[in-house]
Image (cartoon, helix red, strand yellow):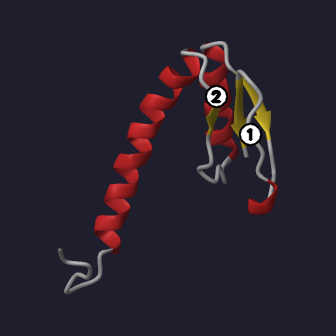
Amino acid sequence: MRLFADEPTMELDAKAMKRLLVTLNDIWPQVAKAGIDVVLDFGFWRRALRDDIRQRAHSIGAVTKKRVESAGECRRAEAGELWLP
C-alpha cells in the first residue's frame, strides 16, 4: 500500500472530487424520493447551486430546510426533510 505520491496530486484530487459530486447528485434524489432523510453538506457557496438543489428536491416532493450550524450543533434531520446549508 502506497500512502504518498512522488508528485502533487491536486489534479487527481480535483477529478476525484468532481466524480464524487456527480455521483452524489445522481443518488441523493433517489434516496430522498424513497422517504429517507438526506443531508447535503457540499458548501453551497453559489446561490444558483442552492436554487437548483431546492428545485430538484421540490420536484420529487422533498421538503427543504436551510440550516447554518457549527460542527458542534449538528442535529438529526426530522422525518422527510432535506437539509440545505
Q: Secondary structure at mark 1?
A: loop
Residue 29 location, x and y as percent? 52, 24
Q: Which mark is residue 37?
A: 2
Give the amino acid at mark 2.
Asp
Label 2 crowding class (10 Å Cα cut-off): few <14, some 14-19, many 20+? many
Residue 21 location, x and y as percent? 44, 46
> Residue drawn 74% across and 35% down?
77
> Residue drawn 66% across and 49% down?
46
> Residue drawn 79% across and 39% down?
66
> Which residue is identified by label 1?
76
Give the amino acid at mark 1.
Arg
Using residue 59 as the reference point, say whether residue 17 is left or right of it: left
Which residue is at the far bottom? 6
Closer to the N terminus: mark 2 or mark 1? 2
Using residue 30 as the reference point, say whether residue 84 is left or right of it: right
Q: Where 49 sits versus 70, above or below?
A: above
Q: Where 33 sits versus 74, above or below?
A: above
Picture quadrant of residue 36: top right
Using residue 74 as the reference point, say whether residue 3 is left or right of it: left
Residue 11 location, x and y as percent? 31, 69
Q: Secondary structure at mark 2?
A: loop
Picture quadrant of residue 80: top right
Using residue 46 as the reference point, say whether residue 8 is left or right of it: left
Q: Quadrant of the N terminus?
A: bottom left
Q: How many marks?
A: 2
- Check whether the beta carbons of the residues at disc 2 and disc 1 lie within 8 A of each other: yes
Residue 19 location, x and y as percent? 34, 48
Give how far apart the Cα atoms at labels 2 and 1 are. Answer: 9 Å
Label 1 crowding class (10 Å Cα cut-off): few <14, some 14-19, many 20+? few
Q: Where 28 sits versus 67, above or below?
A: above
